[in-house]
Amino acid sequence: DSGVTQTPKHLITATGQRVTLRCSPRSGDLSVYWYQQSLDQGLQFLIQYYNGEERAKGNILERFSAQQFPDLHSELNLSSLELGDSALYFCASSAGTGEGNEQFFGPGTRLTVL
Amino acid sequence: GQNIDQPTEMTATEGAIVQINCTYQTSGFNGLFWYQQHAGEAPTFLSYNVLDGLEEKGRFSSFLSRSKGYSYLLLKELQMKDSASYLCAVIYGPPDKLIFGTGTRLQVFP
């Protein structure tokens, strides 16, 4: 158990819909990262927040947005869902801003878009 | 563009040593991670290199050469439980961004 929690574990929805994925980092960790992992593209870094502020951005689509709240939990919002958005979404947390800091991954949310 | 290359698959025998290579081309370099991921599970951190040289951690070691854009993960005394995917990831920038390789799937046979 990494100490990072993600809800829900599974999510099935339809194209065009909007969903919210939630992540609670390990106690004391200030950084939260979001990743997408699909079969054909491997692990893709989406975005990082540090202490409530956006710190780094990867290949995150405009239909996707995220935020980190004062209690440090984070949410990833996915809208206008497409079939290709079906993937495993991981959240990770680390103590610092990222460089050299071990990231602890949550168990993931499996999103299926029908 | 940014790129990381790793072999797609490798096989090895229990008790042996295996080296998984990773080459990268990025604009800027701020560190390299290795992660292990078992099928259907979350990645777990193995190592981090930011300076040239070898970092040893038990049965696992990781090497970095920044001038060559090259790293390897060395696994010794292989066990069946080491069968997993091994992901190489680079932090580059500024601004900081993180890119993962597609992973090397290692199968360990008895």
Image: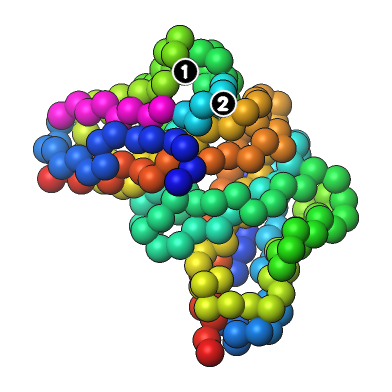
Read off the residue under disc 1: A72
Label 2, residues with CA under 10 Å away: few <14, some 14-19, many ≥20 = many
The secondary element bearing badge 2 is classed as: loop
Is residue B84 shown above or below B18?
above
Instruction: Tell me the amino acid under the disc marked 1.
Output: Leu
The image quarter containing residue B46 is bottom right
**Label 1 or label 2, whichever comes before in sequence order:** 2
Residue B75: which disc? none
Residue, x 52% and y 22% (percent of image)?
Answer: A49
Query: Mark 2 falls within which chain?
Result: A
State the predominant SS element of the stretch in magenta.
Answer: strand
Place residue B76 in its image quadrant: bottom right
Residue density around tag 1, few if under 14, some if 14–19, many if 20 or more, within 10 Å: many
Q: CA distance from mark 1 to mark 2?
A: 8 Å
**Three-letter residue code for mark 2:** Asp
- The reply to whether residue B86 is in sight is yes
Marks 1 and 2 share the same chain: yes
